[in-house]
Amino acid sequence: MTTTLLVIQFVLTILVTIVILLQKSSSIGLGAYSGSNESMFGSKGPTNFLQKATYTLGLLFVLNTLALGYFYNQETSKSAIDKINIESIVPSAPQENSAPAAPVQN
């Protein structure tokens, strides 16, 4: 499930980027390539369509991000710290001898 959502996330990211770059800004940008006033989007051009597409794709992106986080959290029951074997990193304390150690004399 998370693999499917991750692929959808990449596709949504690319689509949102393209739609944002096609919008007309104060500097012409890539909006100059969107067509003239006689385009299929009407006399105002693709502005309203691109705004609605941006809002829709942005909403889908946020909802997909939340779903991806939820399902990933369900699949992963342990954190990265829980997976580390502490005994392999920290050596155990040495065993105490039954006989006391002899004092060192100088």
Image (cartoon, helix red, strand yellow):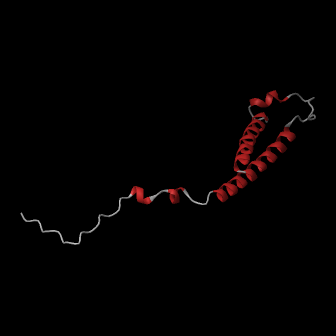
Residue that extends furthest to the front in the rendered view of this protein:
98
Residue 12 placed where, x, y %? Answer: 75, 42
Q: Nearer the viewer, residue 103 or 21?
A: 103
Q: From the viewer's perspective, is residue 81 above or below residue 20?
A: below
Q: Nearer the viewer, residue 57 or 77?
A: 77
Q: Nearer the viewer, residue 64 or 5?
A: 5
Residue positioned 74% across, 48% down in the render? 61
Q: How many marks?
A: 0
Q: From the viewer's perspective, is residue 68 above or below residue 101?
A: above
Horizontal side of residue 40 vs 79, given as left or right: right
Q: From the viewer's perspective, is residue 91 above or below residue 40?
A: below
Horizontal side of residue 91 vs 52, given as left or right: left
Horizontal side of residue 106 vs 68, given as left or right: left
Quarter the C terminus occupies: bottom left
Residue 50 placed where, x, y %? Answer: 83, 39
Residue positioned 81% across, 27% down in the render? 33
Q: Nearer the viewer, residue 105 or 37?
A: 105
Indicate the quadrant where residue 39 lies.
top right
Residue 46 placed where, x, y %? Answer: 86, 36
Residue positioned 51% across, 58% down in the render? 81
Q: From the viewer's perspective, is residue 25 above or below residue 83?
A: above
Residue that extends furthest to the left in the rendered view of this protein:
106
Q: Is residue 36 something that shows in the picture?
A: yes
Q: Is residue 28 something that shows in the picture?
A: no
Residue positioned 7% across, 65% down in the render? 105
